[in-house]
Image: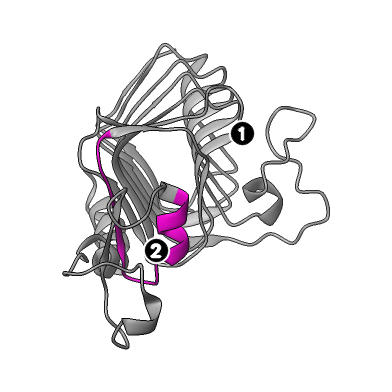
Amino acid sequence: MPRLALRVLAAVLGTLSLAVGCGGGGDGSDKGRRPAGAQVTIRVPADAPTISSAVSLARPGDLVLVSAGVYHESVRIGTARVTLRGVSRDKVVIDGRLRQPNGVVVAAPGVAVQNLTVENNTQNGVLVTGSAKAAAGTPGRSGGYDTGEEPVTFLKSFLVSYVTATRNGLYGIYAFSAQNGVIEHSYASGAADSGIYVGQCKPCRIVVRDNVAELNAVGYEGTNAGGDMYVVGNRLAG
């Protein structure tokens, strides 16, 4: 990997270290008893019945740890520095059943999505975006997102790691209006457009590394993506 790419990667992972490294004892189900500044692990379904309800309880620095199972929901993470992590990549499945646009929407900075599968969504498996319109799931005429007169707002810092995204209607993993991020060790297949897509992020400061994208219309696509943008060590095919 180029030396500058390593610097970008180190900077991003340093920003995310509090979120990814969190996970102290206790749960976040009773906010009234949480010590100020404490970071906790919220377990699904032990502490919250759904992933979305656990995410709604989370505060910056918390870990949402998801037990094995199939979850029929769309998860939106709007709190900064939250980590969403499955206990098993293959056994934690967010299944849209072709009834919802996105499996996971990251709409806050410093969020990590790790070690799970997202499938059967009408638009995207994982969407990372600073655009309010995109986060709301409103598609544009071209099949992507038409943000119209919305001011460009970049989401700062994200991590998508060890994620499997299969059979999604647009993109498997989609970073749009997002900067300072890493997409790594993930697998994307069966997307009607790109398995992995990075767009509208100049200067991006994004590393896409050690992923596999296959059996999609396009393996990887980048549009309006440049400025410390590194795509290295991947296996990408249509």
User: In x, y percent, where is residue 77?
Assistant: 48, 56
Name the residue rendered at 46%, 55% in the picture: 53
Pick the quarter of the image with the N terminus: top left
Name the residue rendered at 58%, 25% in the picture: 170
**Going by the image, does 135 lie left or right of 3?**
right
Q: Can the viewer see residue 11?
A: no
Crowdedness near tag 2: few (<14), some (14–19) or many (≥20) residues, C-alpha within 10 Å: many
**Which corner quadrant of the image does residue 8 belong to?**
bottom left
Residue at the far left: name it. Answer: 25
Provide the residue designation for mark 2. Answer: 110
User: In x, y percent, where is residue 7?
Assistant: 26, 60
Badge 2 amino acid: Gly
Measured along the vertical axis of the image, is residue 167 above or below residue 172? above
User: Which stretch appears magenta?
Assistant: 52-68
| Magenta region includes residue 54 | yes
User: In x, y percent, where is residue 175?
Assistant: 50, 44
Provide the residue designation for mark 1. Answer: 101
Instruction: Tell us which disc is closer to us: 2 or 1.
Output: 1
| Magenta region includes residue 97 | no
Q: Are marks 2 and 1 in contact (CB under 8 Å)?
A: no
